[in-house]
Amino acid sequence: MLKGFKDFILRGNVIELSIAVVVGTAFTALVSAFTTNIVNPIIAAAGGVQTEGLGFAIWPGNSKTFVNIGGVITAFVTFLITAAVVYFIFVAPMNKINSLVKSRLATAEPEEEPIPADTALLAEIRDLLTQLAGTDSELTTAGSSAKESEGSR
């Protein structure tokens, strides 16, 4: 049980995972600041001058019933930006590195040895005999009738 844990720790996945968490947390703060200070005002401007943003109130006059559609759009934009950065900064380069490592570590496929000439000739003879065996019944009947006619002479 401890050997498995040791292998897991030494394999490097824990380090990669912890780096991803730290970078992801820092990046989320950056994207949140961007969407709060740039995207939200643009979306709120689409809602009109006298409203709290893009959305509507279920009960007019009660701010607790305000359905904030702009907040949902902001969360979606945040998700798209985060996913794009994670893909292009982490996933795509790691896929490229993994493919390069695999291509270098891959052993070359052994080439098939050429068939010796005598073996190829024997294979051709075998194939011809197989073809003749299919027409053998025709040859046998023709050959037996020819033998019978010779024997009656």
Image (cartoon, helix red, strand yellow):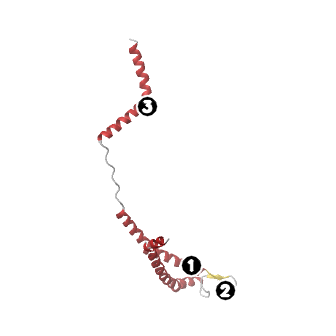
Q: Amino acid at mark 3?
A: Gly
Percent position of residue 15, x then y: 44, 77
Label 3: which secondary element: helix
> Viewer-nearest of labels 1 and 3?
3
Percent position of residue 121, x then y: 32, 38
Q: Amino acid at mark 2?
A: Lys
Residue matched to label 2: 64
Spatial CA distance of label 1 from label 3 is 75 Å
* Residue ranking furthest to the left: 117
Q: Residue at x 55, y 77 (%)?
A: 76
Q: Which mark is residue 134?
A: 3
Labels 2 and 1: the sequence-earlier one: 2
Spatial CA distance of label 2 from label 1 is 19 Å
Q: Residue at x 49, y 77 (%)?
A: 82
Q: In which quadrant of the rendered image does the C terminus lie?
A: top left
Q: Residues within 10 Å of mark 1 (few under 14, many from 20)?
A: some
Residue matched to label 1: 73
Q: Would you identify the image quadrant in which residue 92 lies?
A: bottom left
